[in-house]
Image: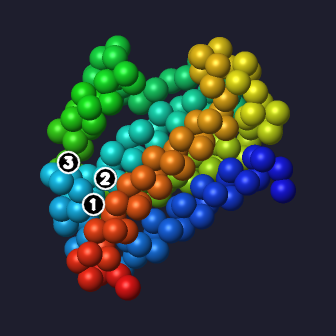
């Protein structure tokens, strides 16, 4: 399997792990698992940042500059450098969405990211100089960062679930 195949396989496994953890437990969405954030808030957070990764991947597929989601402009020019500011804005503006919409948005966004990843040739995915708007980073880095971001929150939720006796 090539590097692209490994990255996408890891992302698919990540998606499946999340779906297994969330499956059949509607109450998990409203539980405060990470400080002030509910599981639903974590999924909103992941979905919002996932939109950035998808915008970058889509830009590569279409060979154009990234078109970021509207929330980026609302946060301001320092949206990427000021993650706390961005996360606060995301929470404030999406917190009230129902779980069913949040979960579906996240699932659809994750599937879109995988589809876009499949469309980018491996050489372009691995080349850090391919897309000037990535400032030396490769699209593979973007996909791996998405994996790592999901894993970070998954690990926290998994530990919490075990502590609460929700999982063996």
Residue beneath the point at 62% across and 50% down: 114
Residue 21: percent from the left, percent from the top?
Answer: 41, 72
Is residue 103 positioned above or below 161 on the image?
Answer: above
Q: Which residue is mark 3?
A: 95
Foreground: disc 3 or disc 1: 1
Disc 3 residue crowd, few under 14, some 14–19, many 20+, Cα 10 Å: some
Q: Which residue is mark 2?
A: 42
Q: Secondary structure at mark 1?
A: helix
Return the residue nearer the eye: 102 or 10: 10
Contact, mark 1 vs mark 2 (Cβ under 8 Å)? yes
The CA span between labels 3 and 2 is 10 Å
Return the residue nearer the eye: 10 or 56: 10
Q: Earlier in the sequence, mark 3 or mark 2?
A: 2
Q: Seen in the image, is 88 located left or right of residue 168?
A: left
Q: Which residue is mark 1?
A: 39
Residue 158: percent from the left, percent from the top?
Answer: 37, 68
């Amino acid at each position: 399997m090539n590097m692209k195949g490994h990255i996408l396989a890891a992302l698919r496994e990540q998606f499946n792990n999340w779906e297994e953890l969330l499956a059949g437990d509607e109450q998990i969405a409203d539980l405060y698992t990470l400080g002030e954030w509910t599981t639903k808030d974590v999924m909103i957070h992941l979905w919002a940042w996932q939109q950035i990764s998808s915008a970058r991947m889509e830009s590569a597929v279409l060979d154009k500059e990234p078109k970021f989601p509207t929330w980026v402009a609302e946060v301001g020019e320092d949206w990427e450098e000021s993650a706390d500011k961005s996360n606060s804005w995301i929470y404030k503006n999406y917190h009230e969405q129902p779980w069913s919409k949040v979960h579906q948005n996240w699932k659809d966004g994750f599937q879109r990211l995988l589809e876009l990843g499949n469309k980018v040739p491996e050489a372009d995915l691995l080349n850090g100089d391919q897309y000037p708007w990535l400032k030396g980073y490769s699209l593979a880095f973007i996909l791996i960062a998405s994996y790592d971001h999901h894993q970070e929150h998954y690990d926290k939720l998994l530990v919490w679930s075990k502590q609460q006796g929700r999982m063996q």
